[in-house]
Image: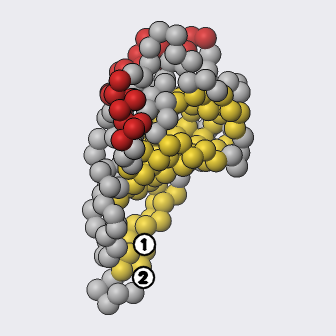
Amino acid sequence: MAASPFPPIHRVVTGHDADGKAVVAQQGPLPTVVEVAAVPGTVFHEVWSTAGAPAPVGRAGADPTLGPLVLPPPRHGTRIRFVDIPPETPASLAAMAAHAKRAFAEIGDAQASTTAAGAPHPLMHRTETVDYGVVIEGEITLVLDDAEVALRPGSVVVQRGTNHAWANRSGRPARMLFVLVDGAYEAELQARLGAA
């Protein structure tokens, strides 16, 4: 994996000891940091996930970030990650278009890809989630079916299951923080999406 232009993420996970006192259960670099081979320079930094609601709170358990990279959160769960997004070039956009389905398969959700001829971006995708996306460093453009929004550090996107992509047209790397929450489309929207 190429060296990241950003500092590594330092994670501190708390828990409880046998007496119920707060303790540091884990501390250090993230164990799962993965560059997406189909989109070189795109790096997923897996921080944590929960697999239910309410999320179990107790003593230190197994690290939920170990194992294969998966885009959406577990059913009724959450996922938090940082994503480093390299600047786009004409060559990288062509490669994205050629390998979009493979890129989403690499991150465990091939069906998320909605790329098609005439799409506004080659990495258009949709997940049945509510995602909070925060720009930490750099500049990103949120690309929707019929709109685009320029984002800078401190910008927050509440992405509600919409078809979208993240475009980096700034000429320099960007880093975003995402919290994904499992969701369910309302029946009317599900029917429209199923008919599309």
Q: Hey, which residue is sitting farthest front in the picture?
A: 188
Q: Position of residue 183 (x, y in %)?
A: 39, 48
Q: Amino acid at mark 2?
A: Ala
Q: Which residue is mark 1?
A: 14
Identity of the residue drawn at 28% across and 67% down: 61
Q: Amino acid at mark 1?
A: Thr
Q: Is residue 134 left or right of residue 24?
A: right
Q: Is residue 122 left or right of residue 73?
A: right
Q: Which residue is mark 2?
A: 22
Closest to the observer, 73 or 45: 73
Residue 180 shows up from this direction: yes
Residue 95 shows up from this direction: no
Closest to the observer, 103 or 55: 55
Q: Is residue 109 above or below residue 51?
A: above
What quarter of the picture does the C terminus occupy?
top left
Q: Position of residue 184 (x, y in %)?
A: 36, 46
| Structural distance between the alpha carbons of marks 2 and 1 | 7 Å
Residue 144 falls in image quadrant: top right
Closest to the observer, 31 or 160: 160
Q: Is residue 161 above or below residue 47?
A: above
Q: Neighbour class for label 1 at 10 Å: few (<14), some, many (≥20)?
A: some
Closest to the observer, 62 or 160: 160
- Say which mark, if any, is on residue 65: none
Identity of the residue drawn at 38% across and 75% down: 15
Identity of the residue drawn at 40% across and 29% down: 192
Whether label 2 touches label 1, CB < 8 Å: yes
Residue 116 falls in image quadrant: top left
User: Secondary structure beneath disc 2?
Assistant: strand
